[in-house]
Amino acid sequence: MKIVWSPLALDKISDIADYIALDKPTASLNWIESVFSEVEKLSSFPESGRIVPELSSDQYRELIIGNYRVIYKQFKSEIQILTIRNFKQLLSPKSLSEK
């Protein structure tokens, strides 16, 4: 299954990596690698993430990677990564970026 990153998700991963790099550049690179590695697993196991608890739809799932939530939606032939957020932040439908 194809994985597609939304512009919002790419912006978020860049912002988070920049923030981590302020303190620990190596940790920032390791974090980016772990996010892409975990997300890549979704191509084989698209339902491995849990349902996003604060949304009233089972179409949205999330992977928890360290202190961050990778929010995604599965379509027939692809998985769209919508956004990345700190695990303490609640999610609203307005904060999602879709095609």
Image (spheres, rainbow, N blue to C red):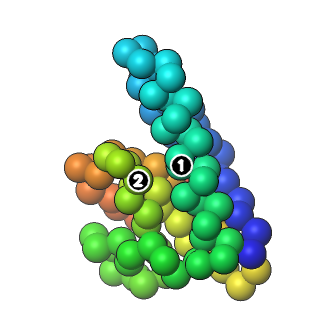
Label ID, residue 35? 1
- Marks 2,1: beta carbons within 8 A: yes
Left/right placement of residue 98 relative to residue 18 reads: right
Mark 1 crowd level (few <14, some 14–19, many ≥20, 10 Å Cα): some
81 is higher (above) or lower (below) than 1: above
Q: Nearer the viewer, residue 29 or 15?
A: 29
Q: In which quarter of the image is the C terminus?
A: bottom right
Q: Which amino acid does label 2 sit on?
A: Ile
Left/right placement of residue 70 relative to residue 75 reads: left
Q: What residue type is labelled 1?
A: Val
Q: Is mark 1 on a helix, strand or loop?
A: helix
Q: Residue at x 61, y 67 (%)?
A: 41
Q: Residue at x 49, y 19 (%)?
A: 25
Q: Where does label 2 land, which residue?
A: 65
* Quadrant of residue 62 within the rendered picture: bottom left
Q: Residue at x 49, y 28 (%)?
A: 28
Q: x and y percent of residue 52 in the render?
A: 36, 72
